[in-house]
């Protein structure tokens, strides 16, 4: 299955579903975590980011879906900073009085978890069967007892990422099939490490690795909702990206060529049943887009350094741990201190969308009309400027030379305004023509 490359909407991801106290199993070798890519002067940067979150506030974990959405709007410094600092944007939006109106329902989450458990039951026998059928036909099928399922538990996301890297290395060196259930991977986002957790990664006997995404939307007659498949592909591309440096290290250690496959396995319920079916999804486009967009993100510490002294997004929760005591006006001031790049696409991808939309509308910014319109309007930045430019003999954009309507946007606006005026000048309901008999 190939999916069109919908515009990439986001990234930071750490979702540690295991207790922080979990320790590596006794007797198992533990890998020393290598420094996260791009980690700079941790004392300085982390101290500033802690100030931004507030004392004692744990950094918010992000998932690959959030990472893909961040990558889709690389011009938004506000989101890059909030995500990079691990700030809970949902809680912030709520405290600002503009709560987010999207997210998965509890029912959908429970249903998704139940389906995933079913797919991975019996040591992943059905999952491996589907993967072999879709991605490795013509090769010997994996016998259930030959599939390694390494334990990936370790303390904290860094420990789990290191344990995952070690398990991948061991499985690749062994030259057999291996199923890694919820491995932890790290990817650099705006100069900070972000931890992402795919549903599974499968190691093939030839040394290649496949990312597995398990979703609860149905695949009917072999095809699924294109928008949902596109979102899953963007998410999977983040995992592939995170696996690439691990593959490089593994290849150097094992002496085997290691390849992260750019076709991932998407597993969904078949038709209207609870039985799993799967399709191979080509994520090459999504991979290229995510790589490019993440590289464009401004480093978090640069954005933080430009903030006025004392800026913080701390909600100062009351003793109940839920009620913010910080005034919304103060929070709004802190949020406005960082530039945003609002677009209507934010409504489906960012918890702060209602707040940013309100501000964008108050400013009369043309960005609120969509990226397409924004591009068409060239040097006109506000609705007021657009309306003024549409008037014949009115001013052009402030950046345009004052020698007539050369700007194609202004020419088009004046033409549209003239057509509208002409249409409005006509009688709304034409009467019967004199030569035609009236309706009896
Ligand atoms: S809603 Fe606001 S903070 Fe979020 S991505 Fe859009 S502009 Fe940035």
Image (spheres, helix red, strand yellow):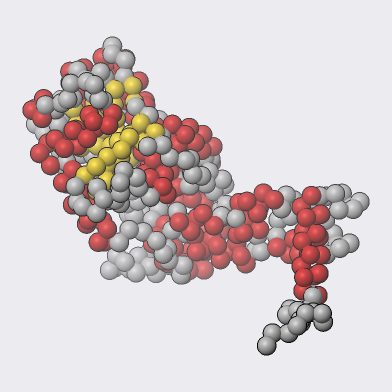
Residue at screen point 51% across, 44% down? 7
Q: Nearer the viewer, residue 109 or 42?
A: 109
231 to 104, vertically: above or below: above
Query: Which residue: 31% across, 43% down?
Result: 222
Residue 266 position by quadrant = top left
Q: Residue at x 76, y 64 (%)?
A: 387
Q: Quadrant of the N terminus?
A: top left
Q: Position of residue 111 (x, y in %)?
A: 22, 56
Q: Is residue 327 left or right of residue 245?
A: right
Q: Is residue 226 left or right of residue 246?
A: right
Q: Quick one: 21 or 370, which is closer to the camera?
A: 370
Report if residue 85 is visible in the image: no
Q: Residue 199 vs residue 102: left or right? A: left
Residue at 41%, 36% in the rendered image? 2
Furthest toward the right, the residue is: 403
Q: Is residue 224 visible?
A: yes
Among all residues in the image, which is located at the extreme bottom?
440
Q: Quadrant of the C terminus?
A: bottom right
Where on the picture, by quarter, is residue 343?
bottom right
Residue 435 point in image, percent of width and height: 82, 79
Q: Name the spot of residue 132 as percent of width and height, x first.
A: 22, 29
**Residue 351 location in percent, x, y?**
43, 58
- Nearer to me, 308 or 281: 281
């Amino acid at each position: 299955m190939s999916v069109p490359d919908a515009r990439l909407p986001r990234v930071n991801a750490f979702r540690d579903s295991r207790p922080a106290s979990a320790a590596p199993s006794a007797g198992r070798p533990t890998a020393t975590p290598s420094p996260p890519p791009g980690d700079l002067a941790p004392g300085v940067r982390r101290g500033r980011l802690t100030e931004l979150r507030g004392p004692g506030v744990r950094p918010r974990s992000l998932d690959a879906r959030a990472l893909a959405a961040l990558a889709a709007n690389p011009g938004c410094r506000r989101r890059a900073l909030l995500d990079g600092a691990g700030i809970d944007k949902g809680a912030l939006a709520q405290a600002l009085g503009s709560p987010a109106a999207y997210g998965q329902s509890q029912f959908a989450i429970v249903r998704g978890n139940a389906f995933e458990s079913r797919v991975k039951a019996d040591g992943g026998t059905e999952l491996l069967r589907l993967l072999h059928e879709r991605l490795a036909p013509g090769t010997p099928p994996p016998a259930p007892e030959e599939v390694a399922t390494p334990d990936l538990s370790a303390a904290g996301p860094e420990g789990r990422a290191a344990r995952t890297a070690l398990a991948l290395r061991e499985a690749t060196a062994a030259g057999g099939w291996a199923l890694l259930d919820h491995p932890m991977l790290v990817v650099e986002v705006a100069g900070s490490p972000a931890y992402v957790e795919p549903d599974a990664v499968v190691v093939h006997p030839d040394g290649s690795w496949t990312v597995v995404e398990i979703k609860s939307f149905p695949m009917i007659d072999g095809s699924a909702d294109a928008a949902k498949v596109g979102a899953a592909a963007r998410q999977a591309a983040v995992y592939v990206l995170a696996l690439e440096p691990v593959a490089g290290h593994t290849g150097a250690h094992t002496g085997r060529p290691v390849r992260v496959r750019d076709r991932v396995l998407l597993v969904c319920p078949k038709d209207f049943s609870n039985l799993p079916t799967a399709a191979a999804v080509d994520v090459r486009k999504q991979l290229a887009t995510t790589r490019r967009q993440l590289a464009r993100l401004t480093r978090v510490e640069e954005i933080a350094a430009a903030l006025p002294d004392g800026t913080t997004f701390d909600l100062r929760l009351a003793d109940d741990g839920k009620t913010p005591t910080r005034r919304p006006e103060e929070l709004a001031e802190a949020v406005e201190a960082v530039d945003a790049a609002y677009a209507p696409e934010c409504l489906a991808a960012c918890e702060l969308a209602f707040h940013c939309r309100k501000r964008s509308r108050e400013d009369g910014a043309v960005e609120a009309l969509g990226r397409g319109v924004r591009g068409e309007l060239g040097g006109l930045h506000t609705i007021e400027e657009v309306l003024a430019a549409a008037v014949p003999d009115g001013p052009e954009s402030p950046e345009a030379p004052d020698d007539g309507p050369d700007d194609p946007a202004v020419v088009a606006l004046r033409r549209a305004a003239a057509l509208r005026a002409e249409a409005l000048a006509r009688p709304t309901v034409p009467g019967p023509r004199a030569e035609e008999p009236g309706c009896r």
